[in-house]
Amino acid sequence: MTHVSLKDLTKVYPGSKVPSLDRLSLEIPTGELTALLGPSGCGKTTTMKMIAGLLTPTSGDVTFDDRSILREKPEHRGVVMVFQNYLLFPYMSVADNIGFGLKMRKVDKSEIDRRVGEMLDLVKLPDLGKRRPSELSGGQQQRVALARALIVQPKVLLLDEPLSNLDAHLRFEMRDLIRSLQQEMGITTIFVTHDQEEAVVLADKVALILDGRLCQYDHADVFYKRPANEAVARFFGGQNFIPGQSSGTAFDSALGQLALPQNAITGKGTLTFRPENVKIGPSQTNGLTAILEDRIYLGTQTRLRLRVGETMVEAIANPDEVGDFEVGGPVPIHLPPQALWVLQ
Ligand SMILES: Nc1ncnc2c1ncn2[C@@H]1O[C@H](COP(=O)(O)OP(=O)(O)OP(=O)(O)O)[C@@H](O)[C@H]1O
């Protein structure tokens, strides 16, 4: 059971002038799963490698239960890392792969056999212990990699894009398996992904990193309701950003005057609201008349491009709600005050 702290963790690679990771600070409570989320090259793997001891930070610290681990060798940190490409030993059986960490620790053979059997059951591969990794599907190999990591009961589990090589169906299955095993075993876990949905579904808290900097660290729903800035909102699918002036109770912009929720900031700002929160139909509060510029049927949803005066508004609606509206014609919409958020 380990509380992990990253304190101003920074990495400047030799020959580079800009940090690949810039003063990242995170508190990851015991037993929780935090997702490091961000686009390719934002510094996620660099962070993981510094925690695992595969890379030395330029500055900053990593502590486990308030004790710095930076001077400890990787094998003494109690950290295991699972990579996207599994890295199983090809000439060993599945069972020997899973038991490898225990063999290195000189655990008795009978004890290893017992625990490997338990792990095979846990990752739902009870009959495949004798096979070679090459005789398994990608999803099965990833389960073996997970079992091999978990069998040593690590203090901290690092998962680096473990699902990215799996097809959609297997990805859902593995996601559920990882979540249930992690909760059952209570291992503090850091999960790297560039997939916003994966982060939201799996993690207790999400750390969004853009260009080597932490932009926001919070529970997943906060990223949708209260993004810290426009870049965060855009990463989470936000598309509506309207400049204007907030009085705290109303927002004046090219859309006219709109009522705000309580506790909105005052002053110059940018109004944002999610496409799915644009409601179709008239309302006395924040009702607007838009012109339908375009509509794209997405199966379970319809994406609408709307124009209010000169301002474009992106909306996502239930196909049944928008059935009768013609492109080029008017559509009554409204923006519920609680769906509005002002960015400074
Ligand atoms: N050994 C290295 N030497 C120099 N620069 C590096 C090295 N490793 C990574 N970088 C740079 O550091 C930045 C962060 O890389 P990192 O691998 O941590 O990103 P990432 O978020 O994990 O990306 P991805 O999702 O593509 O794996 C990138 O700009 C990368 O080019």
Image: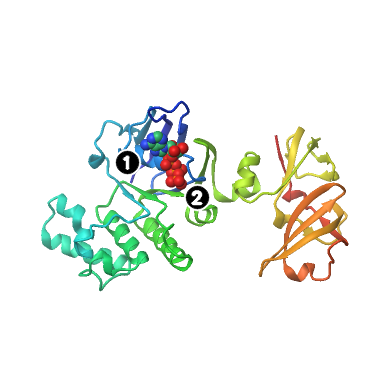
Q: Is residue 28 visible?
A: no
| Kind of residue at disc 1 | Ala
Q: Mark 2 near ligand 1 (CB under 8 Å)? A: yes
In-image side of 276 versus 99 (left or right): right
Front position among marks 2 and 1: 2
Look at the picture and state if 294 lies above or below 51. Answer: below
Residue named by callout 2: 194
Which residue is depicted at the point 27% across and 71% down?
A: 126
Q: For residue 52, which numbered disc appears in the image?
A: 1
Q: Is residue 140 visible?
A: yes
Badge 1 marks a residue whose secondary structure is helix
Q: Position of residue 116 (x, y in %)?
A: 22, 63
Which residue is depicted at the point 82% across and 41% down?
A: 250
In-image side of 252 versus 158 (left or right): right
| Kind of residue at disc 2 | His
Q: Position of residue 286 (x, y in %)?
A: 84, 51
Q: For residue 217, which numbered disc appears in the image?
A: none
Look at the picture and state if 17 lies above or below 250. Answer: above
Nearest to the observer: residue 194 or residue 218: 194
Nearest to the observer: residue 92 or residue 8: 92
Look at the picture and state if 34 lies above or below 323. Answer: above
Q: Residue furthest front?
A: 15
